[in-house]
Image (spheres, helix red, strand yellow):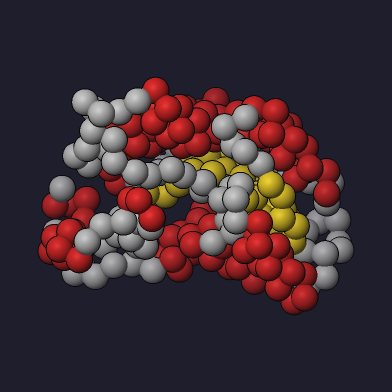
């Protein structure tokens, strides 16, 4: 594998938006570090598929992003495998309702650790490698970071904090490292306990000027653009939401 092949670490990239971003960067000739916490089979399958397409072009690494020791281990392995690290995409996220009267300390720790603490300490751990490559960071934020979603105060606060970190890092880490964000609107509906009913989905789309959901490609292409085609963009947060933030 050529020594100048760029390398990206994408958190939470075994499925959904993260996996699609992995696939698009791989198509562009990048090597990928696929991070996962619990989706081992999906991460391993994705890495196997990519390595079949191009030998030694992807690895899957586990880490609990609530643990700083795991974060440091992940960053070390990611940078050491191919001897470089050119991009970090903080994609992993926790989303579920937690109204203020019922929210617990466990809710606080779960949401803040994954959505805010992990990106900070992961970037800190990856920073020497990113500086060495004049690399780039993209944080997945949310349109609710500016206009909060009812009954999700901790989630909204965590994403607002990540937006603030994005802008702060863009100043603090320049000129070596660029830092930007992407704020998705209605792309993929939440799964599991956070799933929403058809009526809620319809109300969201009614407020979206384009009157439809986006696709994982809409987010992945924006991330790839910021990493590969935007060398003079830093400190920006791009809303990819079909215009919904205009009506919030």
Of residue 242 and residue 38, the one placed in the foreground of this image is: 38
In the depicted structure, whether residue 93 falls above or below residue 212: above
Is residue 124 among the parts visible in the rendering? no
Viewer-proximal residue, 191 or 246? Answer: 191
Q: Is residue 16 visible?
A: yes
Q: Nearer the viewer, residue 188 or 44?
A: 44
Q: Position of residue 175 (x, y in %)?
A: 60, 33
Placement of 13 over or under 107, stated as above or below: below
| Residue located 30% across and 28% down the image | 103
Q: Quadrant of the N terminus?
A: bottom right
Residue at the far bottom: name it: 53
Residue at figure coordinates x 71%, y 73% from the top left? 49
Percent of width and height locating residue 13? 58, 56
User: Could you say which is closer to the camera, residue 76 or residue 135?
Assistant: 76
Q: Residue at point 44% right, 66% down? A: 216
* Residue at the top extreme, as displayed: 105
Left/right placement of residue 188 relative to residue 28 reads: left
Residue 156: x %, y % from top left: 31, 36
């Amino acid at each position: 594998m050529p020594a100048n092949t760029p390398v990206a670490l994408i958190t939470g990239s075994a499925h959904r938006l993260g996996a699609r971003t992995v696939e698009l960067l791989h198509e562009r000739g990048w090597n990928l570090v696929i991070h996962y916490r619990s989706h081992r089979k999906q991460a391993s399958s994705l890495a196997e598929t990519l390595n079949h397409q191009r030998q030694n072009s992807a690895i899957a690494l586990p880490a609990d992003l609530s643990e700083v020791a795991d974060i440091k281990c992940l960053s070390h392995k990611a940078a050491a495998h191919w001897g470089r690290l050119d991009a970090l995409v903080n994609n992993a996220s926790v989303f579920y309702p937690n109204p203020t009267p019922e929210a617990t300390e466990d809710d606080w720790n779960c949401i803040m650790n994954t959505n805010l603490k992990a990106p900070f300490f992961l970037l800190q751990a990856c920073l020497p490698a990113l500086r060495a490559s004049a690399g780039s960071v993209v944080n997945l934020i949310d349109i609710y970071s500016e206009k909060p979603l009812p009954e999700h105060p901790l989630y909204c606060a965590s994403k607002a904090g990540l937006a603030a970190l994005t802008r702060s890092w863009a100043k603090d880490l320049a000129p070596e490292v660029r830092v930007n964000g992407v704020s998705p609107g209605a792309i993929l509906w939440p799964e599991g306990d956070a799933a929403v009913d058809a009526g809620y989905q319809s109300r969201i789309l009614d407020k979206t000027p384009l009157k439809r959901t986006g696709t994982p490609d809409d987010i992945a292409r924006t991330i790839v653009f910021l990493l590969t085609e935007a060398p003079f963009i830093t400190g920006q947060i791009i809303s990819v939401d079909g215009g919904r933030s205009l009506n919030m």
